[in-house]
Amino acid sequence: MFREMRRKKQILGKQESIDVLKNKTAGVLALLGDDDYPYAVPISYVYDNSKIYFHSAKEGHKIDAIKKCSKASFCVIDQDNIVPEEYTTYFRSVIVFGKIRILEDEKEIREAIERLAIKYHPEDSKENRGWVISKEWRSLCLIELSIEHMTGKEAVELVKGKKQFE
């Protein structure tokens, strides 16, 4: 169903790919948009247990696309160092594919927004976080992407560098 990566020497391991997803703060969500044109939007997220959570406005292109088609992909770039003299970049990135849905259950919404809030403001108090979430509750829309397939890839030069230190 999903293609195998052609350049197998550049594959990131599963845990390395998960670490990229856990540590980065933004990626690009790709959906099937209006008139079946791809719709890709940069978005903040949190990764948790093979799922990625996003928050959104309750209306708009992204929500319409999710309602139209539950398939999505999400890409995170961990590294992109330009090496001019080699006419290349030393990159590391992860792409996931899966099913996306708008959360409806209040408990799921609360858990997802808590995860996002803690990721982006880990020093905040539980009381303040709860107050801010309660204040914004009526306008919150939370989205969950359940990962079905994940690939991580890095520049062959980074792979070679790792092997030097093993």
Image (cartoon, rainbow, N blue to C red):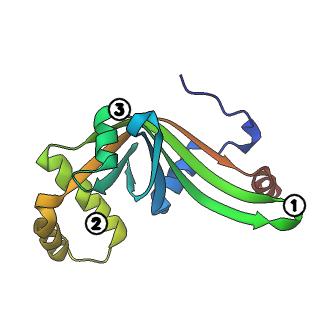
Q: Which residue position is annotated with label 3?
A: 69
Q: Residues within 10 Å of mark 2 (few under 14, many from 20)?
A: some
Measured along the vertical axis of the image, is residue 53 above or below residue 14?
below
Q: Label 2's element?
A: helix
Q: Position of residue 45 (x, y in %)?
A: 38, 57
Instruction: Tell me how far mark 2 sits from mark 1, CA to CA.
Output: 41 Å
Q: Give the residue at mark 1.
A: 86
Q: Residues within 10 Å of mark 3 (few under 14, many from 20)?
A: some
Dot 3 falls on a residue whose secondary structure is: loop
The residue under the point 17% across, 55% down is 110
Q: Label 1 is placed on what type of residue?
A: Glu
Q: Is residue 136 left or right of residue 54?
A: left
Q: CA distance from mark 3 to mark 2?
A: 28 Å
Q: Position of residue 89 (x, y in %)?
A: 75, 59
Can residue 107 be seen from the camera position used here?
Answer: yes
Sequence-earlier tag: 3 or 1: 3
Q: Amino acid at mark 2?
A: Ala
The numbered mark, 2 or 1, whose residue comes first in the sequence reads 1
List the single residue furthest toward the front. Answer: 35
**Residue type of the residue flagged with mark 3:** Cys
Q: SS class of the residue under badge 1?
A: helix
Q: Residue furthest top?
A: 1
Q: Nearer the viewer, residue 94 or 159?
A: 94
Mark 3 or 2 closer to N-term? 3
Q: Residue at x 64, y 61 (%)?
A: 79
In the shown orientation, is residue 62 left or right of residue 107? right
Tag 1: Cα neighbours inside 10 Å, few (<14), some, or many (≥20)? Answer: few
Q: Are marks 3 and 1 in contact (CB under 8 Å)?
A: no
